[in-house]
Amino acid sequence: MEFFEKMKGAVSSKSKEVADKAKDTAEILNLKGQISTCEEVIKKNYLEIGRLYYEQHGQEPDAAFEKQCTAVSNARTGIRELQAKIDHLKGL
């Protein structure tokens, strides 16, 4: 009977370890989800900061932002030109 008692104790101990590990894994996944949410908030706000900066200073940006503002302006010009071609092809 002592053997069965030891087995019962070992199984009980391993079951607790597995349950604890599952609990830790679930908590880690939850925390990683929260980190991901925070990263999305940061990304969204960085984009908003850039958009607001461009709207306010895009025509006369600080030297540190000149390259990026020029790229945005050129891309906007390209979009207008491509849309004009689309409109022309559609007969608009």
Image: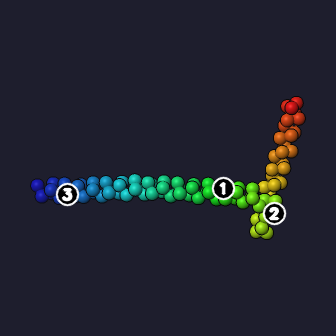
Q: Position of residue 49 (x, y in %)?
A: 67, 59
> Which class describes the residues within 10 Å of circle 3: few (<14), some (14-19), or many (20+)?
few
Which residue in the protein does label 3 denote? 9
Lower position in the chain sequence, tag 1 or tag 2:
1
Q: Which residue is mark 1?
A: 48
Task: Name the foreground residue: 39 vs 28.
Answer: 39
Q: Give the foreground label among 3 and 2.
A: 2
Residue at 81% from the left image edge and 63% from the top image edge: 60
Coloration mode: rainbow
Tell me the quarter of the picture where residue 15 sits. Answer: bottom left
Find disc 2 in the rendering and name its residue: 60
Residue 45 falls in image quadrant: bottom right
Please determine whether, in this image, residue 79 is positioned above or below residue 45: above
Q: Is residue 68 visible?
A: no
Question: Residue at 48% of width from left, 55% of height from top?
Answer: 34
Q: Position of residue 72 (x, y in %)?
A: 78, 55
What's the residue type where badge 1 is placed? Glu
